[in-house]
Amino acid sequence: MAIKIIDQMKKLTFAISMASLLASAALFLQGCGENKKGPEEKVKYVIPDSLLRTLVIDTVRKCPLVNAIKLTGMVDFNQDKQVNIFSLVSGNVQDIKVQLGDYVTAGQVLAVVKSSEMAGYSNSLVVAETNVTATKKQLEASNDLYKSGLASILDVTTAQVNYDQAVSQLETAKRILKINGNSINGDYIIKSPISGFIVQKNVTNNTSVRADNGTNLFTISDLKEVWVQANVYEANVEKVHIGDNVEVRILSAPDSVFKGKVDKILNVLDPISKVIKVRVVLQNPDYILKPQMYASVMVSNSGGTESLCVPSKSLVYENSRYYVLMYHGKGDADITPVEVLNTLGDITYLSSGVHEGDRIVASIALQIYSELNN
């Protein structure tokens, strides 16, 4: 009986050992099967239909190659439409009616100068008028005496000469007074000769002025047209020509572009900064451009050749290289490196990487580029 129990226990132990061995073998085989599957393959990004409906696809084309150079500059007054106002007489400034930045019209009174010179001009006018009256009476009396035989022709001639001289002196006094404002109460009236803005004011009430002083009292400029003076370094002088197209931007209005042409190149090189001034005349109807504002000036001209061009917003810049996204249809796009020749506003010129007629992604290029890289 004991021998049978021992045999059954041996058989049970053997069965448990075999079961454990089979389970281990099954786990081993399962592990081997998983290793044979290997890593999942990477799936290429396809632009989804929801994004395709809003995507802009453009075509590589040939454009006239435009050479462009970016310069720094400053807004300045149009000196052809600027007036410096001086006092023609000495005196004391009173009753200033305008301030710096005010808009004035032609003929508007700016200030009054109390002047002894003006009083002298008024006195000269009165004296000249009195002489004319006196010499006229003398001439009439001489004529009457001559007709009566009591005066000679020489007396009449002398009276006529005196009268003519008195009339000439009166005309001179009137002209002098008119040049100086035509005021007979000793005031010199300073008036604006043109319409524009007070851009300089170098005088205050009770300031004494002299006619021989070289400092102007006011400067008035019509800011409807301004100059932009741009700096061209010596190495770039040959790249700028009279008549070249110009685009000007300023910090206070970054979304505005002011277009004009190179009007003049000053052929004088600054000995310190080594730059030549280039002048651009710009219309300024809304007075957005103000003197002394810094400006970014883009000068461009056509070189007479053509180059492949794409929209500037279609380019992606990463790792010191430019890329475009070549579109093959049905959401399929590839990253393609390109070589950039020049960028002018919304257009970029390419030298290699694409061909005429290629289709490229021209909107949200950076977003799609990131997805393709991932």
Image (cartoon, rainbow, N blue to C red):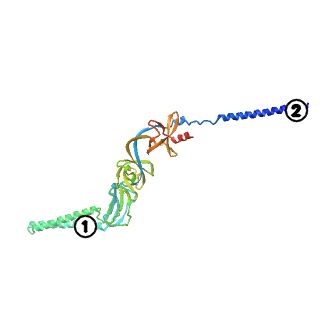
- Splitting the image into 4 quarters, where does residue 177 fall? bottom left
Examine the rendering and report whether any part of residue 223 can be seen. Answer: no
- Foreground of the two, 106 or 325: 325
Q: Position of residue 52 (x, y in %)?
A: 52, 36
How far, Cα to Cα, is label 1 from label 2?
158 Å
Q: What count of labels does the image hold? A: 2
> Which numbered dot is residue 98?
none
Q: Give the residue type that dot 1 points to.
A: Ser
- Foreground of the two, 77 or 266: 266
- Foreground of the two, 147 or 180: 180
- The residue at which mark 2 appears reads as 6
Rendered view: 312 above or below 148:
above
Q: Position of residue 357 (x, y in %)?
A: 44, 35
Rendered view: 359 above or below 172:
above
Horizontally, is 372 left or right of 199 in the view?
A: right
Whether residues under marks 1 and 2 lie with C-beta atoms below 8 angstroms apart, the answer is no
- The residue depicted at 69 percent of the width and 34 percent of the height is 32
Q: Position of residue 367 (x, y in %)?
A: 53, 41
- The residue depicted at 72 percent of the width and 35 percent of the height is 28
Q: Give the residue type that dot 2 points to.
A: Ile
**Secondary structure beneath disc 1?**
helix
Residue with the most extreme bottom position:
150
**Secondary structure beneath disc 2?**
helix
- The residue at which mark 1 appears reads as 124
Q: Position of residue 327 (x, y in %)?
A: 50, 36
Horizontally, is 36 left or right of 164 in the view?
A: right
